[in-house]
């Protein structure tokens, strides 16, 4: 690896992101317990751990500089994660063409050589401050796997994806990426690119994939692709260091003033077995082109964006699920606009996740609320690069709790659609991305002519059926919003058409045919059919239908012997001490026995009552 940093003595080793049991030489497993505090304390513990484990690398021809706010947070989260895979991203490119491995490896190596973000490692210097170092000579990890024509290509692909995720990365050892070319003997093949989110964001993914395949096509043709110079990522870090932290603090304190309880969602806690890894699942649905166009037109008429509509829909869903009118969720900002020159052509990580606070007042009209959300999104732009750990330290949320449990990430247009829009061979290429965020639930939106809604969730906290319902409810909310911009927020529907039918029709279909007969006859039938079944119960007494029927028969016979006829009134008395139960129990016994043969009328009476009684007058 040329200038790859190595541990300088036997007592210091690189910290590994991989928490599996099969340790590797030169690595120290990260085990910090299951419940460290989340914000300043977690950050301090993690950075102190890094400082203790990783010495400042002594590397020739390298440059070191600070981390972006999001990079610092990701580094902490990754080190404190209880299992591997947090913030590991995988891009799968399905290429319907014959690929020559040698030229593909050359294309990847040339791309890594051009972009410093792809040659970056992470460590702490002697002062204990986290830094990233760019290395001059880094070899790409490139493997070719031929699964042959007799095996299921999809099964092999999923196994490789899992293996690559579990292997993880060592932050001080570049490159924090690996490439696998999976061939199955046919024309099509899969290119699997696994990398740590520390080094690049979604816009950079498109730039790198575009460059790799452009260089590959030129290399396969015996030529060299003409590419412009690559802007260095460190310029963005230098720009960040010039920002006014005081203004950001004042803005975020005011924005989150009074918010102290994170928005809760219905979750489950499943116990994981020994050695079990955190499993992240995903469910998705696609909004058709006609509906996507309807959403875009509605947003345009309201002078907002599709991103604003999606923020509103997510806020409404959180409101309905949590019952809270004041909700907060995370939102991903692209972070490139208004920063450095050539930001749109710089490979690196510009994004940041910031809190969005939405007050869902039931009586507020949708059009006015959408404008509020849009204005808030624009107003926070000067403060979008503030570290989330700093933002939370300025809030009233207790230490040890997240500021938010969900994150919304809207890509419009999505990175893969931007690639396919180039036409030619790009139109037939398919792209897929797998993320593993640190939060329990993330909504990723990929918008183009159609819109993909993908929920990425921790299966230990959410059931699949709950996630599927969320996707249905999200579609219902969006469909309800576009019907009338002047409707109140409380009138926007949540339930799907199937759920409404279930609630209003299926669950109300309780009609039962009752035969035209007397009640005491029905009672006798039940006593014959299920004599042991419980009929009456209290804390100290239980009567079955058989016992109650026998008692009714005995007393009915006694009443007939006393001369009770159809015109006779019969009063039943209960003691004050057992008033509630005795009245109910005797009514159950006396009613049937009077009807069974005495044919008299029955009225209940409390023996101890001294107040005037309409029943006595009657």
Image (spheres, rainbow, N blue to C red):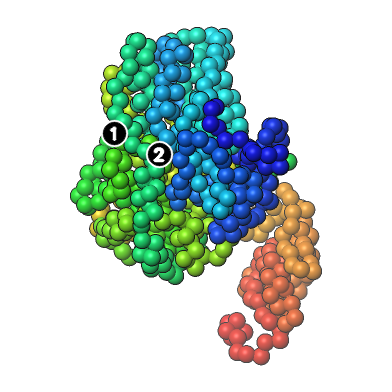
Q: Relative to residue 578, is residue 210 depicted above or below?
A: above
Q: Is residue 475 visible to us here?
A: no
Residue 134, how many percent across, how many down?
A: 47, 37
Residue 316, how many percent across, how many down?
A: 39, 55
> 269 or 352, which lies in front?
352
Q: Considering the image in quadrants, where does the N terminus appear? A: top right
Q: In which quarter of the view is residue 15 placed?
A: top right
Q: Residue at x 66, y 90 (%)?
A: 610
Q: Label 1, on which residue?
A: 449
In the rendered view, does 253 fall on the left or right side of 486? Answer: right
Q: Residue at x 30, y 46 (%)?
A: 340
Name the N-terminal-most of marks 2 and 1: 2
Residue 240, how many percent across, how many down?
A: 38, 52
Q: Label 2, on which residue?
A: 348
Q: Residue at x 49, y 40 (%)?
A: 133
Q: Residue at x 35, y 26 (%)?
A: 210
Q: Could you tell me which secondary element the residue under label 1 belongs to?
A: loop
In the rendered view, does 315 fall on the left or right side of 435? Answer: left
Q: In which quarter of the view is residue 167 placed?
A: top right
Which of discs 2 and 1 lies nearer the camera? The answer is 2
Disc 1 packing (10 Å; few <14; some 14–19; many ≥20): some
> 174 or 576, which lies in front?
174
């Amino acid at each position: 690896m040329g200038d790859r940093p190595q541990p300088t003595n036997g007592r210091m080793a690189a910290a590994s992101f991989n928490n599996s049991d099969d340790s590797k030489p030169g690595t120290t497993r990260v085990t910090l317990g299951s419940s460290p505090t989340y914000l300043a304390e977690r950050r301090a513990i993690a950075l102190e751990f890094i400082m203790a484990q990783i010495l400042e690398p002594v590397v020739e021809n390298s440059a070191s500089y600070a981390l972006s706010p999001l990079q610092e947070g990701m580094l902490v989260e990754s080190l404190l994660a209880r299992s591997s895979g947090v913030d590991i991203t995988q891009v799968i490119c399905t290429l319907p063409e014959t690929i020559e491995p040698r030229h593909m490896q050359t294309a990847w190596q040339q791309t890594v050589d051009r972009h410093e973000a792809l040659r970056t490692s992470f460590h702490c210097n002697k002062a204990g401050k986290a830094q990233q170092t760019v290395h001059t000579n880094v070899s790409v990890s490139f493997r070719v796997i031929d699964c042959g024509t007799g095996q299921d290509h999809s099964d092999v692909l999923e196994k490789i994806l899992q293996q690559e995720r579990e292997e993880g990365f060592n932050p001080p050892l570049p490159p924090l990426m690996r490439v696998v070319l999976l061939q199955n003997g046919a024309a099509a093949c899969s290119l699997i690119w696994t990398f740590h989110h520390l080094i690049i964001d979604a816009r950079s993914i498109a730039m790198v994939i575009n460059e790799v395949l452009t260089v590959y096509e030129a290399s396969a043709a015996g030529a060299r692709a003409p590419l412009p110079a690559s802007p260095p990522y460190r310029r963005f870090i230098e720009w960040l260091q010039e920002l006014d932290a005081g203004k950001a603090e004042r803005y975020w304190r005011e924005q989150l003033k009074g918010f102290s309880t994170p928005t809760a969602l219905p979750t489950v806690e499943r116990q994981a077995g020994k050695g079990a890894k955190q499993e992240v699942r995903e469910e998705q649905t696609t909004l058709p082109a006609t509906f996507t166009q309807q959403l875009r037109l509605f947003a345009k008429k309201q002078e907002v964006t599709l991103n604003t509509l999606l923020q509103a829909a997510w806020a409404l869903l959180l409101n309905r699920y949590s019952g809270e009118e004041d909700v907060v969720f995370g939102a991903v900002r692209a972070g490139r606009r208004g920063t450095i020159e050539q930001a749109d052509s710089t490979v690196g990580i510009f994004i940041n996740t910031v809190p969005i606070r939405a007050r869902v007042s039931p009586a507020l009209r949708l059009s006015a609320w959408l404008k509020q959300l849009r204005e808030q999104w624009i107003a926070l732009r000067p403060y979008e690069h503030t570290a989330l750990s700093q933002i939370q330290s300025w809030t009233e949320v207790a230490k040890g709790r997240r500021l938010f449990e969900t994150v919304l990430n809207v890509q419009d247009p999505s990175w893969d659609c931007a690639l396919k829009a180039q036409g030619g061979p790009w139109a037939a290429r398919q792209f897929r991305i797998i993320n593993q965020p640190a939060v329990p639930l993330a909504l990723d939106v990929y918008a183009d002519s159609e819109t993909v809604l993908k929920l990425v969730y921790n299966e230990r906290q959410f059931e699949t059926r709950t996630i599927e319902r969320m996707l249905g409810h999200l579609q219902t909310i969006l469909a309800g919003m576009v019907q009338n911009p002047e409707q109140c927020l409380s009138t926007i529907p949540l339930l799907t058409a199937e759920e409404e039918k279930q609630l209003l029709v299926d669950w109300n279909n309780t009609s039962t045919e009752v035969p035209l007969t007397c009640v005491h006859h029905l009672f006798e039938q039940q006593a014959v059919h299920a004599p042991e079944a419980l009929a009456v119960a209290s804390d100290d007494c239980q009567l079955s239908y058989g016992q109650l029927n026998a008692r009714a028969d005995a007393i009915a016979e006694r009443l007939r012997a006393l001369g009770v006829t159809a015109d006779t009134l019969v009063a039943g008395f209960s003691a004050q001490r057992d008033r509630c139960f005795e009245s109910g129990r005797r009514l159950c016994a006396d009613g049937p026995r009077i009807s069974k043969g005495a044919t008299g009328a029955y009225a209940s009476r409390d023996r101890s009552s001294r107040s005037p009684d309409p029943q006595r007058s009657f």
